[in-house]
Image: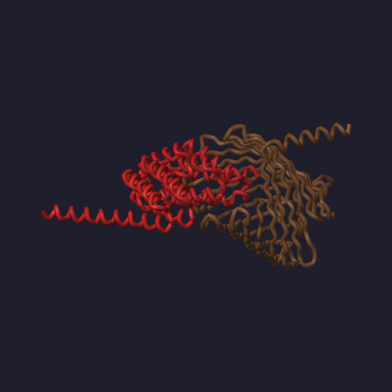
Chain colours: A brown, B red
Amino acid sequence: MLKKFIFILIILANSLFCLEKNIFLKSGIGLGYDSNLLFSSPYYPTELYLFKIEGLGKWGKENFKFVVNMNSDVEVYNVYYNFTGGVGAGILLLPTDETLIKLSTYYNYTSDINQSFSGKAEFKQDIFGFLTTGLSYNFENSMGLNGVTNQYYTLHNVSLSFDFDVTEFLGMELTFDEVYNSYSMIKIDGNNLQHNTISGDGVLVFKPSYNYNIKLGGGYAYHDAFNTNLLVFYDTNEIYLFNSANQYRIIASIDYEWNPKIKTSLSTEFSFSKLLYHQINENDYKVIFATDYFLNQNWKAEFTFLYNLKDSELLKNIERWRITVGINYLF
Amino acid sequence: MKRLINILIMMLVFRFVLAQQNDEVTSILKDGGFTLSEQKVILSIFEDAKEKGIPFEDLIVILKEQRLKGSSYYEVSTEILKKIKVLSSVKESNFPYWSDGNVRKIAFYLAELYTSRQFMELSREINDKKLRKKDIENLFKLILFLNSAGINSNDSFSLIYLIVKNKEMDPSAFDAIQRIIIRSKDLKLTPQQIIVDISKQLSRGISLRKTIENIEKKAREEN
């Protein structure tokens, strides 16, 4: 039996390698500083030493591909370190130039936090040459590794998207999401905590030239926890994840290409949440500035600056800034 | 009478320039250590080229290069004949701005890079679309970039031909093409795939701007 199995595996592997293949690898090192690593109080400031390896392989024909991917990130802090790694596999179908079907699975391990298994089915279709519609279903099962109860959950997400050109210089992106989350270790009246979110986002994309684009948009989300209890977790402190709440978001970003080698982007995201059954507001302001510099096809330097401020009526006001510089080699 | 004198003066100047060019050829040939009969053969090749209307200075450049290399008489004459063949095909193609030395160099480079049929088609399209001198120079920079990125001449031709055919002459579009090629590994696509994909979309009449947007979007979706 085992011999047969190995034989079939060899045949499969052989046929895979006979197909046209493309393998991309990216490895990088970086340095940085984080003023509040856990984004909580008390602050934990630390230097950062970053190591990254990313890989993606595609085998197949033009309209049918097997995709295998892996990620591994190590962040070393001044007293401990964190490792996040994952492997995934999927199938990509492109039956026509206008259609994309993608089925994929992924296993992720984050040291001391959780391990999760996820699966995704995605369908995209271009219509009339200016409208792209997308429908996807995403499933994720997470298990905690450090005894924190909110790391045990099962999540289902259905997403519908429309992406279209109003004119050559103006595009619009609409996304509608339904996320259902069940926390198996958080019990409310003897039952698992259920959490359902319905959200809609709209973004206008101004693209006046090849060199830059500006995005402006907003969104609304309705979070329903099916109970009136107040639940607060200081380690994942987005309060709307475990309680019923209204949430409004504003996003704005600009991407600017200085020349074919240098790209800069500045993006901001503001979120305003208000709990339904408690007089508690929580506002979050985030700004990210990033610059990529491509020395050539093989070397890429990255600079990122992040600033995040949370203004909460329940938790203390907290802020965080993080700066990283990295250099990557692309194989 | 005055007009006659003017014409005479012009003829004299013209004669003088020609003689000078012939002298230059002779002196280069002498320096190269060619025998008198060899010099005569090469000179007659030059005379022949002159009759075909091929610019002297382009041939002298080749002659100087060959002398620096220390090439033999056979190598020199073969190289010059080869150059004459390419130059006369360039001339036949009615490549625009023929009198401009820089554009002529570009035309010569293209005639060597692409097959003669491809070169003729491209020249015809460049003429049809009445490209400006600056457009041709920008196009040339893109072609050099594609070469340096390892794109083969057939794929390079398809892209360049369609760009001219669709008259997509915005230099920032050329920058955008360079941009996705330089970032190809980060987008997890091969440069060859990108070029074939751009050509495919251009041939369907999709604008270059939309094409580049599509490719950047597709790269995000596939990975």
Which one is in front, B153 or A132?
B153
Q: Quadrant location of residue A261? A: bottom right
Location of residue A299 in the rendering, given as x and y in whole percent from the top left corner: 63, 57
**What residue is shown at x 59% (from left), y 58% (from top)?**
A295
Which one is in front, B84 or A205?
B84
Q: Vertical placement of A136 versus B19: above or below?
A: above
Is A139 left or right of B73, judged from the image as shown?
A: right
Location of residue B189 in the rendering, given as x and y in whole percent from the top left corner: 61, 45
**What residue is shown at x 81% (from left), y 48% (from top)?**
A143
Q: Quadrant location of residue A157? A: top right
Residue B127 appears in view = yes
Residue reaching furthest to the left:
B1
Is B12 left or right of B155, judged from the image as shown?
A: left
Is A34 left or right of A296, judged from the image as shown?
A: right
Which one is in front, A67 or A148?
A67
Location of residue B3 in the rendering, given as x and y in whole percent from the top left corner: 14, 53
Badge count = 0
Quadrant in which the N terminus of chain A is drawn: top right
Residue reaching furthest to the front:
B36
Residue B168 appears in view = no
Location of residue B181 in the rendering, given as x and y in whole percent from the top left corner: 56, 49
Q: Quadrant location of residue B25? A: bottom left
